[in-house]
Amino acid sequence: MTKTAWVFPGQGSQEIGMSADLLKLPVGKEKFTLAEKILGWSVSEVCQSNEEKLSRTLYTQPCLYVVETILADLMRQKGHQPAVVAGHSLGEYAALYAAGVFDFETGLRLVKRRAELMDNASGGQMVALIGFDRQQLELQIQYGQDVVLANDNTDAQVVISGKPAAVEGLLAKIKVKRAVKLNVSGAFHSPLMTAAANEFQQFLKSTRFSDAKVFVLSNAEPSPTTSAATLKQRLGQQMTRGVRWREICLQLPQEGVEKVVEIGPGKVLTGLIKRNCPDLELENVSTPAQVPN
């Protein structure tokens, strides 16, 4: 039997209409109804018709979590099971749900609070870099101040995060083929999120985690674990630490994984995995029709 990993994308993968086919299914209707009670607004309405809202952190994160967890439910209904799970930033919450660490409602309440805190963040900047000298970049970050590696996606594609002046200063010192400023309110996955992370930590403390049923590779520490206490600790570190996605990808073959299924809208993660581990079999499930029988 092929050893499979499920991975879940984060903010930036959302797209209008991503919930349409899920609304027709019993499990989808049930989750959308429960989500509206918890959030106070309709995920399906935002996903279907409001691009401006869907691109705002406050709404993006809950919408992605709801859509991805429903797709995970559909995978299980068809008898599919992962051996390992991982998620990119917000996607880690869907991964923890898929691993049985918490139920749908618990995860959504965590995501709701996270989205509120991150949406209120300000004073930071994030820039995606494509094509650069990695050693040069790492040296500038190591000896500089107020800028960090927020997303380490591949050897040639990362995101830096920090104070705007520090980010601009770093960009002036390195050669980059392409630099793209991200449309976000704050310096996510950096120490500038410490105040928000501390507030979230208080909320997280009172949340019950169970041991995972399968191995989880966390953003803050990509070594496999099923320990509830360890997973909670790592999730608490996620807001202020970088997403170590490149290392997560490289860990998959070490765990004997042969196939990776990206569960959620878009194909961002499978694209990154292909660059990091070209020998892995890749599959995307973004709609019910794509769930294998």
Image (cartoon, grey):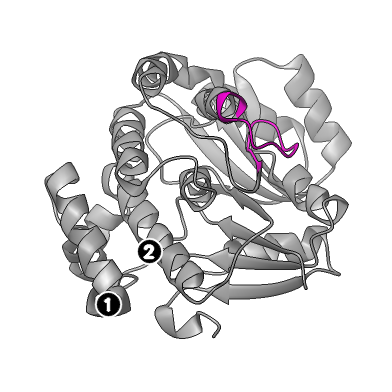
The disc, 2 or 1, on the residue closer to the chain's N-terminal end is 1
Residue 182 position (above or below residue 19)? above
Residue 46 sits in quarter: bottom left
Residue 210 screen position, x and y as percent:
50, 34
**In the rendered structure, which segment of residues is drawn in magenta?**
216-230
Distance (Cα) linking label 2 and label 1: 10 Å
Residue in the foreground of this view, choosing between 166 and 71:
71
Task: Please tell me whether residue 211 belongs to the stretch shown in magenta.
Answer: no
Q: Residue at x 53, y 49 (%)?
A: 95
Residue 227 is covered by the magenta coloring: yes
Residue 150 in picture, x, y percent from top left: 61, 34
Q: Which residue is mark 2?
A: 70
Q: Residues within 10 Å of mark 2 (few under 14, many from 20)?
A: many
Q: Quadrant of the N terminus?
A: bottom right
Please name whichever residue, 292 or 210, is drawn nearer the observer in this view of the structure. 210
Q: Is residue 135 above or below residue 57?
A: above
Q: Which residue is mark 1?
A: 25
| Residue 176 shows up from this direction | no
Residue drawn at x 47%, y 15% is 194
